[in-house]
Amino acid sequence: QVQFVESGGGSVQAGGSLRLSCVASGGSIRLKDIGWYRQGLGSGRQRGAVATSLFGGATEYVHFVEGRFTISRDNAKNTVYLEMKDLKPEDTGVYYCNFRRSLTTWGQGTQVTVST
């Protein structure tokens, strides 16, 4: 079973940037769509960005991160990244990666805290 380990979170001020990494083990992610999910305090996980497995690396974003976040993947490293810029307090939460479909066990996630 594929497992994900997320890293790169931290505390930043509004307007700051972070780069998250997600390393997969136990199987290749090459043929799978991978998403970054955010879980805010008291809320469920919401998918914010997807790196598809399509040739050319098509990506998808929800409206409230589009233009600020960039998802990318390195299949050779079995790794997915999330570049986050112009961070806002509402971006605060624990960030996870997982498949877009057929979710596997959730990792520990990485905490992102954005202060005003």
Image (cartoon, rainbow, N blue to C red):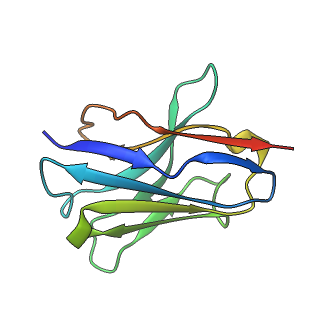
**Toward the viewer: 98 or 13?**
13
Drawn side of residue 41 relative to residue 20, left or right: right
Drawn side of residue 25 relative to residue 101, left or right: left
**Toward the viewer: 94 or 68?**
94
Q: Which quadrant of the figure has residue 75?
A: bottom left
Drawn side of residue 92 relative to residue 111, left or right: right
Q: Where residue 49 appears, x then y in whole percent?
A: 49, 54
- Say if 33 sits above or below 72 in the image: above
Q: Where residue 3 appears, x then y in whole percent?
A: 23, 41
* Total numbered labels placed on residues in the image: 0
Q: Which quadrant of the figure has residue 108?
A: top left
Residue appearing at x 33%, y 32% in the figure: 106
- Say if 112 sits above or below 73 in the image: above
Q: Where residue 8 appears, x then y in whole percent?
A: 51, 52
Of all residues, the one furthest to the top in this rendering is: 42
Drawn side of residue 61 relative to residue 58, left or right: right
Q: Where residue 12 appears, x then y in whole percent?
A: 73, 50
Residue appearing at x 28%, y 71% in the figure: 54
**Toward the viewer: 76 or 48?**
76
Instruction: Assign the N terminus to one quadrant of the image.
Output: top left
Q: Which quadrant of the figure has residue 58?
A: bottom left
Residue appearing at x 87%, y 44% in the figure: 116
Of all residues, the one furthest to the bottom in this rendering is: 56
